[in-house]
Image: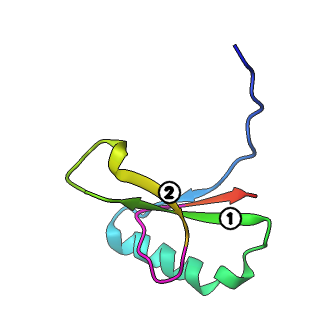
């Protein structure tokens, strides 16, 4: 067994409904340029909402103009 150090906590955000998630996205977009360069933002893209397994999910580097289902902030 290999013991791997746990990474530092990383906040995630997902709205209770699509409108709330969109509101979070608008806030992230508004302050995107103010996010320090040592932090990264990932957005969750779900390719097919009918498929309930995680194979249709992927985390993408957050870009302005793309809609996401959730967000994840991490240390680079």
Spatial separation of the CA atoms under disc 1 and disc 2? 12 Å
Quadrant position of the N terminus in the picture: top right
Q: Name the residue under label 1.
A: 40
Q: Quadrant of residue 76?
A: bottom right
Q: Locate residue 36 relative to residue 33 in the image: left or right.
A: right
The magenta stretch spans residue 36: no
Q: Which residue is drawn at 33% across and 69% down?
A: 18
Q: Locate residue 47 relative to residue 41 in the image: left or right.
A: left
> Is 65 above or below relative to 46?
below
Q: How far across and how far down the image is residue 16, in percent? A: 37, 61
Q: How far across and how far down the image is residue 48, in percent? A: 26, 57
The magenta stretch spans residue 70: yes
Label annotation for residue 50: none
The residue nearer to you, when weighing 9 against 54, is: 54
Q: Mark 2 points at which residue?
A: 59
Q: How far across and how far down the image is residue 43, in percent? A: 50, 64
Q: Locate residue 25 relative to residue 53 in the image: left or right.
A: right
Q: Earlier in the sequence, mark 1 or mark 2?
A: 1
> Is 12 above or below relative to 29?
above
Q: How far across and how far down the image is residue 40, in percent? A: 68, 65
Q: Is the image coloured rainbow, by chain, by secondary structure, or in one colour?
A: rainbow
> Is 35 above or below relative to 72?
below
> Is 38 above or below relative to 56?
below
Q: Residue at x 26, y 45 (%)?
A: 52
Q: Residue at x 75, y 45 (%)?
A: 8
- Label 1: element kind: strand
Q: What stretch is highlighted in magenta?
A: 63-71
What is the chief secondary structure element of the magenta stretch?
A: loop
């Amino acid at each position: 067994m290999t013991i791997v150090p746990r990474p530092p906590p990383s906040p995630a955000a997902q709205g209770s409904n699509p409108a709330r998630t969109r509101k979070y996205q608008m806030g992230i977009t508004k302050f995107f340029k103010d996010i320090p360069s040592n932090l990264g933002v990932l957005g969750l893209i779900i390719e097919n909402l009918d498929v309930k397994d995680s194979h249709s999910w992927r985390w993408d580097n957050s870009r302005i103009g793309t809609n996401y289902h959730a967000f994840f902030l991490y240390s680079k």
